Image: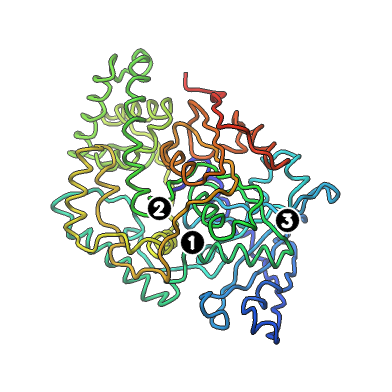
Amino acid sequence: MRKTRITSLAAVGIAGAFLSALSPTTTFAAPDVSAAKDPLRPYTHQQLHWKRCDPATPATYQCTTLKVPLDYGDPAGQKLDIAVSRVKASSPQDRHGVLLLNPGGPGGEGLKLPVDVGAELPGKVKRQYDLIGFDPRGVGRSSPVSCGLTADEKSMDRPYKPETFAKDVQWARTVADKCRAKNGDKLRHLTTRNTVRDMDVLRAALGERKISYLGYSYGTYLGAVYMQMFPRRTDRFVLDSAVDPARFGRGILQDMAEGTEPAFTRWTRWTAQRHTTYHLGNTPDKVRKTFWDLVARADRKPVDSTEGPLTGDGIRAQRHKFFNARDAADWVAELKQAAGGTKPTPSFEEDTSDGSIWAVICADTARAWPGDPEQYRRDAIRDKARYPLYGDFASTIKPCAFWKPGTEPATKVNNKVKALIVQNEWDSQTPLPAAQAMHRSLHGSRMITVVGGEGHGVYPFNSCADKTATAYLATGRLPSADLTCRAQQMAQ
C-alpha cells in the first residue's frame, strides 16, 4: 500500500548496489544458564558490530546484522538475519534514544531510510535520535522471500471478467503454491507479530529501554501492533498515512476501491471548472462521460500512454491518479489525445515484488479470506457496481485464498498507548476513513488531518503537520486535541 512519496522512499532501498560491501558480523552470545530462564537472552544480549554500509555512502551511515529466531516458539531453532542500519544522533548531549523507521508495504525495504528520510527530517529530530532502519524479515537483505514468479504472476491488478476468472483462480493458486514450494514452513513465520518481536529484540540489542518510531502506510499497522504487544516499551510513535487495523488484509484493498470514488467525483468537479484548459467537459457529468467513453474505447483498442498500451481495465487500474486532481486531469487529457493518434513517450516502472507482500498479508490474515472461489466472483461483481473504478480489482480472488495461515491470528489493536497519527485528506492508498479507524483503535492517540492534502505520506514532506509532529518527537508532548490544518499547496 505504498505510492507516491512512500513508493519513492522504498524504491531507493531496492535500486543500486549500495550494500555490495555490506558484510557486517554479529557476535551471537553463547547459551548459558540464564538462557534457560530466558530463551531469548542470546538474541537480546547479542553484540552488534557496526561498519560503514558502503564506501559510496556517508561514513555516518552504518550497518550490521541482527540474529532473530525464525520461530519465537522455538528460539533454539532456525535463525534469520535482519539487516539493520543507523545514523547516530548528531548531538550526544541531546540524545533521547532511537527512532525506528519503516516505509510500509508489506515488503518495503527500510535499510536506507536513515539516509533518505533523514535528509528530510529537521535538525531538532536528528540531534536527539539515532535513526534506525531495517529490512523486515523476508524482505531485502533480511532472509528475503523469493517465489520465482514470472512477470505476469507478479502483477496484482487483475480485473474481474467472467471469461478470465478461471485463469485468475489458477494464478492465485499458482502464486501460493510457488511461494510455498520455494520457502516451505518459513512462510508461516513471516508475520507482522514476528516482525514486531524482531523490533523488540533490536531494541534490547541496542541497549534501549524504549523505542520511538516513524512508520508509513503498512508501517502504521506494524507500529500499532508493537504498541499492542509491547506497550511499556513504546515511547514516541508517529503513524503516517494509517491503515484501518481491523481491516488489514483483504479489507485494505477494498478500502482503496471505496476511497477512490469520492476522489474521482472531486476530480470531475475540479476538471469541469477548467474545461478551457483540459477540454474534458464543462460539467462534472460530462467529464465523467468523457472518461468512461475513453475506457470503453480503450477496451476496443488499447490506448498508448506513458505506462505503455492501456486497455480500459488498464486505465481503471490507475485509480490512484485521481487523488491528485491536476495530475489526473493532465493524464486523462493526454490519454484522450493519444486515443486520437498522438503518441506519448512510454516510461515503464518495473515491478520488483516477488511474493513478500503476499507473504505478510496472507500469513497474517489467511484465516479471514474465503476459501470458495465463487465468493470472490460474487464480491467482485457486487463491488464493481458499487465502486466502478476499482471495486472488482479489490474484491476478486488473490493468493491468500490458497495460503497456509501464519502461526498466529492477526492482532486486534485496542489500547491507550500514546501516538500521533498524521493523514492527508486525499490519500490514494490509505483513505482518510482508514486513518480515522486507526485513531479510534488507539485511544491514547491524537490525529492531525491535512485538509486538502494529496498524496501518500505527510511527514516530513513540507506539510502543515510538520511543526506539530516535530514538536511531539522532540518533547513527547501530544497536542491537547485532534488538529486540522490546510494543505499549503492545494490544486488550483
Residue 11 visible in the current orientation: no
Q: Quadrant of residue 197?
A: bottom right
Q: Is residue 217 left or right of residue 478?
A: left
Q: In terms of depth relative to the viewer, which is nearer, 111 or 71?
A: 71
The CA span between labels 2 and 1 is 11 Å
Q: Residues within 10 Å of mark 1 (few under 14, many from 20)?
A: many
* Residue 53 x %, y %: 70, 61
Sequence-earlier tag: 1 or 3:
3
Which amino acid, mark 1?
Answer: Thr
- Name of the residue lying farthest toward the right: 93
* Residue 454 x %, y %: 48, 31
Which amino acid, mark 2?
Answer: Phe
* Badge 1 element: helix
Which color scheme is applied? rainbow
Name the residue: 29% across, 27% down.
Answer: 336
Residue indicated by mark 3: 61
* Residue 47 x %, y %: 74, 73
Q: Residues within 10 Å of mark 2 (few under 14, many from 20)?
A: some
Tags 2 and 1 in contact by the CB under 8 Å rule? yes
Name the residue: 78% across, 50% down.
Answer: 89
Give residue 192's mark: 1
Sequence-earlier tag: 2 or 1:
1
Residue 423 visible in the current orientation: yes
Name the residue: 53% across, 63% down.
Answer: 195
Give residue 248's mark: 2
* Residue 398 x %, y %: 29, 58
How many discs mark residues in the rendered view?
Answer: 3
Q: Quadrant of residue 176?
A: bottom left
The CA span between labels 2 and 3 is 33 Å
* Badge 2 element: loop
The CA span between labels 1 and 3 is 27 Å
Q: Relative to 317, is 296 above or below?
A: above
